Amino acid sequence: MPQLALGDSIPHDTAHAVSVSLPTWNSNVAWASGDQSVVSQMSTGYPRFFIHRSIEKFARDVATKFGDATHQAMLFPTKLTAAWCADFLRDKAPAHALEGLDIVHLGLDLSRPGGTAIESLSPSVSAVLFHRDAYKCARQFWQHSGVGISSRRTEFCHSLLNQGILVPEDSSRTIAPSERLQINITQHISQSGYQGTTSFPEENGENALGRNHIPTKALHQSSSIPSAEGEKAILRRRIAGILDRSRASPPKRSLETGLPGQSTERLAEHDVYLFPTGMSAIFNVHRFLLAVRGSMKSVSFGFPYVDTLKILQKFGPGCVFYGNASEENLDQLQARLEDGERFLGLFCEFPGNPLLTCPNLKRIRSLADQYDFAVVVDDTIGTFGNVDVLQYVDVVVTSLTKFFSGACNVTGGSAAFNPKYRYYSQLKATAEKEYVDLYWPEDAVVMERNSRDFLTRIVRMNHNAEAVAELLRDHPLIRRVCYPKYNLDRANYEDCRLPNGGYGGLLSVTFHRDEDAIVFYDHLETHKGPSLGTNFTLTSPYVILAHMAELEWAASLGVDPSLVRFSVGIEDVEELIRVFKDALAKIPIICGLTLYTELQGWVPSIIRAYNNNHIRPDRHNERYVIEFEEGEPRYVGEPRPEIDEAWEDLLSRRRKSIVSTRGHTNADNPGSHQLQPLGRVC
């Protein structure tokens, strides 16, 4: 498999790549720690954690043109999204950094040649100008909310600015706080009647590996960019169709209880809303629920993706956090509900990232019906190609960036409102007023193209991931494999698994020793970087990247800092297994371990190994065995000359020792089974 250099885009030479190569463990640590010697080598990065170089340049130009020497800029697609950022800064940034806080809206000058021709694209940009000391807070908003401009929108709009077609609207330079949430920005929504789809031939899953489907330069011409209303409609229909037909039967509970606001309608295209990122879908669903139900705390259930928890904590009245997604956690939540506490909604993932834990959605639905809260589930990892969570939830949110796209070259998100539960009508009414289509047309075109073979790819990813999980689960150096098929809460996954669904393309492992995880990662010949759901296998020390500043907190919830996460792609499964076996073989089995011998018959037979387990040669089978204190023995690979040599050397030295000290060793007491240290082998 091809290896990429530090900082190279994944896929290679892709202008709008969603991942970046971090080929060694140390490079991940350095990146997460902000080490500029590594950060400076990044050509790109995961979009919300790394502001694309083109966006940085555009922001610098805007700050230079419309700010002063102390200003920096953060760019958003509309006045409203920029106003959210400004409000966040007023709440979180140091007081001295608020001086000069401003919003500059850049819109089309329709008097310029070409302006009218591209009006339907809504190529607007709103810049928040702020003192450099507020940058940290501005970056937090960018990362948490996911509503910043995309790199494709940036390229198009920056070109318009340089041509003088995109100009500032003086009336939007400042916005009074009382007006911020009432801004009418519907004039910026594309009103095009475009109904066609861009003509591209279909590709099957065999040719989808690492593809960069759409020639961006061809799209990136103002005369050739469609408004993408047709592509967006196809995406909504595609998502609604998969979600709806995945359902074995309507949830009996909802039909029998007849809860207020319920409907027996099937999920339709108009129930699906598109967003520029998965996090912006979660951010906006939370915003919609606050509008529907008022200011109430939420419940974050299970170890969450980092920014989901941050949204619930920082935007609104906060949240109650249950980090294990266990039955005990549900007991604790139920006790609070029985005591009269009430919540806006419960947010969880199915399965969770990175432990692949699956909460009991059936029980959560029962509590939601009884105690009146919404259930919002992120099914990004399980995917609606494998699991039916819609039967239990009010809203399904999905990062389309991941498995749905697969190509790692575009971002997107969706939220589907379930017409069978009580908040449907209120959420729909709120969305009619509050939802704004922020999805840049070029991004929608690329996403539509990428997702055509989604279901075909998922089947292959399921197969490959299960094969990799089997290999790793049987290896003695690995302490735990996190995968829905093997987790203790498998029954919860099976309750939602579709008849033809698999266990997904994501798994994580922990090793008995941190050193082994590092050696394995450094030698594994897959792409290595952030993100998941790619058509190619992508490996990451996820906890290091996502939780570097809170490793102890993560560990307290059972998330090992040395965990290695794999998003398994659609490569040939035999080649995948070979690559994983090769990396495992690089781990020295007895390097740095103390050797012991059992003196009965002068035959050494035990090496003290990991966590008080033992490794010994099996001469009959010509293999090595690790004997665990708990569980059955496991074989370790083929014979290795270095181990045999160490063994013979050990035997020779022991015999000499016994001969030279006869009368003073346990050789005179053949019944003794005392273990004695004999040195170290590396």
Image (cartoon, rainbow, N blue to C red):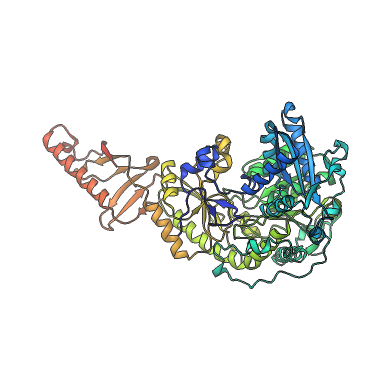
Left or right of 471? Residue 248 is right
Left or right of 591? Residue 630 is right
Left or right of 203? Residue 232 is right
**Residue depicted at x 49% and y 56%:** 469
| Residue 157 visible to the viewer | yes
Residue 507 position within the rendered picture, expressed as x and y whole percent measured from the top left:
53, 53
Front position in the image: 508 or 597: 508
Front position in the image: 640 or 178: 178
**Residue depicted at x 44% and y 60%:** 577
Q: In this view, does 488 lie above or below 104?
A: below
Give the farthest residue toward the bottom.
201
Residue 612 falls in which quadrant of the image? top left
Residue 363 position within the rendered picture, expressed as x and y whole percent measured from the top left:
70, 50
| Residue 341 visible to the viewer | no
Left or right of 271? Residue 611 is left
Residue 130 position within the rendered picture, expressed as x and y whole percent measured from the top left:
73, 35
Residue 613 position within the rendered picture, expressed as x and y whole percent measured from the top left:
37, 43
Give the farthest residue toward the top.
96
Q: In this view, does 660 lie above or below 255?
A: above
Q: Quadrant of the N terminus?
A: bottom left
